[in-house]
Image (cartoon, rainbow, N blue to C red):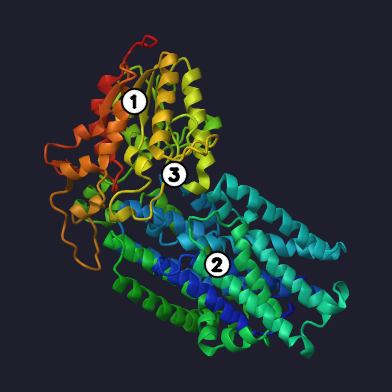
Amino acid sequence: MSAPPSQEHNAHPTYRPDIDGLRAVAILSVVIFHAFPIVLRGGFVGVDIFFVISGFLISSIIFGSLQRNDFSFVEFYAHRIKRIFPALIIVLVASYTFGWFALLPDEFKQLGKHIAASAGFVQNFVLWKEAGYFDEASELKPLMHLWSLAIEEQFYLIYPLLIWGAWRLRFNVLTVIGVLGIISFGLNITGVQKDVVETFFAPQTRFWELLTGALLAYFQFFKRVHFTEWLQTVTTQQDERLNTLLSIAGGLLILVAIFGFCKAMLFPGWWALLPVIGAFLLILAGADAWVNRKILANRLLVFIGIISYPLYLWHWSLLSFVRIIEEETPSRRMRVIALALSFLFAWLTYHLVEKPLRFGPKTVSKIVTLCTLMIVITFIGYITFQHNGFPSRLSPSIGSQNEQFQNKSTKSCQSGYPNFASFRCPGTKISKPTILLLGDSHSMSLHAGLLEAINDSTDNVLTFAGWGCLPFFNVASFQKTAQDSCAEMANYSLKFAEKQDSIRTVILSARGPMYLSGKGYGSIEVDTNRFLAFPDKPEITDFHVVFRLAMRETIARLLAKRKQVIFVLDVPELGFSPKRCVQTRPLYLSHPIPIKPCAITRQDFEARNREYRELVFAVLKEFPSVQVFDAAAQLCDDQWCWAMKDGKMLYRDDDHLSIEGSRLVAHALVKLIQTKPPLAQ
């Protein structure tokens, strides 16, 4: 069981060029989806195809070795290290080096965290915790795609030991695989209805896809014992037509998923069955099936399949870096260049790094060196995160400008309020809260300034902010795939406000125009979609009606509990990155002309907010004691709504306030807060 790496013990499956061709289909789907999502809306299912392939190949090695009683854990993990580590190390080092020269401190800090998470194969957990409305867009995370590699490595750590243990204890291995697969698939189906982000990134809801490949490998090795005569003859000459039908069916299922799916669907869920079963059928059909032989075994697809792993590593990092430093969606030309470089770098990585280390002399020093390098990279990434992206590496002018973009208001108060684990809950004073700020990420942007504004008073502000959640009773207001979570979160926070006697003032703040229109603002948010609904009244589909009824109920209930209610009219949305107003970046691929003035017109702001403000004021006529705070009044004059004033950046992105912006708005807001409980209305 513990053979040295220099001695081959474990079995290796017979090479099938059609599986490399299937890898090519998977990687091309993912690459095209990432570069041109409109062209191939379902290309993300390529990852699911990879999972099936990985489960099949790894299980083939394990079953083949167990069958001849010669399985070595040392050799198994040595092969995994030589397969995974070399290309990953190159991409992580290259990303860090480029980031050092090209990224601003907050961006480089995040990259450091993701490098540490990727090298430690926990990137899926990090992204799971980050994901949401408060988080940076996925396009701005150069190592976002390594979540899938982390899940595979987590599977490799657990699965071989389970199968080896079942084999040694003479348990039925097929039963073990089946039970684990059913449990994982069940968690996937139930989880996707409750929390689509967790279900997407969690290993336990994805393992069933790898176990589907494992099931296929089991069929291959033990079908004579466990299957009927019909299945035993699948690969015989008389059943070539059946194999061809299986391969065609598998290919069609994958094509339907690639061209028919979109990222707005509840995924993985039931939909993931299409690409998974498609890959299963293609591999089951065998190398001689028509689709496999004529299409998948094509020399070009086989070549792409061979370099698919380094291509997967390179392509997203390059696309993301281009997106970051250009501060907008890259042009088609830039994306084509990035993809061309991805193929070039993948080919060079495979031939100059991966192939020599993977297939060269089998020495212990090779494994030790690769593991040591990965540990060092993890440490460097962690240190970079801890040191806030090393601002000193940039010129003082760039560093000072970048400080305006950072949001330092997200420290957790979860330990004090454990029942609000789903919320962003910034730190407060030790005393009981007297002010409760409720809303979405726009209320979070107000928190830092408000906390500073009341610092010398006896007041204490607590913020509960849900990801894209409107702070009204019984309203689901996130993306359509996660509606129930927002209603639950809003209800918890508002009931807390009703019951907590220490809370005198409740501030309601949210990005109103987005909820009414269901859309983001400007070309920077073309894919933003929001939905308003009453989960218990699905027949009400008009967003305006939902907003009006929910706002009325929420205010009435809070006033009945003698709470002071302050309704914040939202800040202007810019529709562009404020970083484009100043030359803050140390490196550009092109030389964009700074936006001047750094503002949007008052006319554009009023057009975007007209319906929202009319609706809000119509409701507030019923509640004269509610105080209205116009956040835009602090940022707008007669002609412009400013993103920068007096050399200070007031926004950290296209619609969230920076620290300076939060200070400016909150110091005006705090003047409305009463020091005594209001009379009941």
Q: Give percent across and percent down for residue 384.
A: 40, 54
Relative vertical location of residue 455 with respect to residue 590 in this rendering, above or below: above
Write down the residue under mark 3: 531
Residue type at mark 2: give it: Ala
SS for dot 2: helix
Viewed as shown, does residue 495 lie left or right of 161? left
Q: Residue at x 78, y 82 (%)?
A: 234
Residue 91 seen from this side: no
Q: Give percent across and percent down for residue 658.
A: 28, 41
Outermost residue, front side: 539
Q: Looking at the image, is mark 2 or mark 3 earlier in the sequence?
A: 2
Mark 2 vs mark 1: give the one in front: 1
Write down the residue under mark 2: 257
Say few, some or many: other residues with alpha carbon within 10 Å of mark 2 (under 14 / 14 to 19 / 20 or more): many
Residue 25 seen from this side: yes
Which of the 4 image quarters holds residue 641? Answer: top left
Depth check: give the residue in front, 100 or 227.
Answer: 227
Relative vertical location of residue 562 with respect to residue 257 in this rendering, above or below: above
Say few, some or many: other residues with alpha carbon within 10 Å of mark 3 (under 14 / 14 to 19 / 20 or more): many
Outermost residue, top side: 679
Image quarter hosting the C terminus: top left
Write down the residue under mark 1: 619
Residue type at mark 3: give it: Phe
Q: Give percent across and percent down for residue 610.
A: 25, 38
Viewed as shown, does residue 399 lie left or right of 4? left
Q: Give percent across and percent down for residue 90.
A: 45, 71
Measure the C-alpha gap from mark 2 to mark 1: 45 Å
Depth check: give the residue in front, 473 or 33.
Answer: 473
Q: Residue at x 59, y 69 (%)?
A: 49
Residue type at mark 1: give it: Val
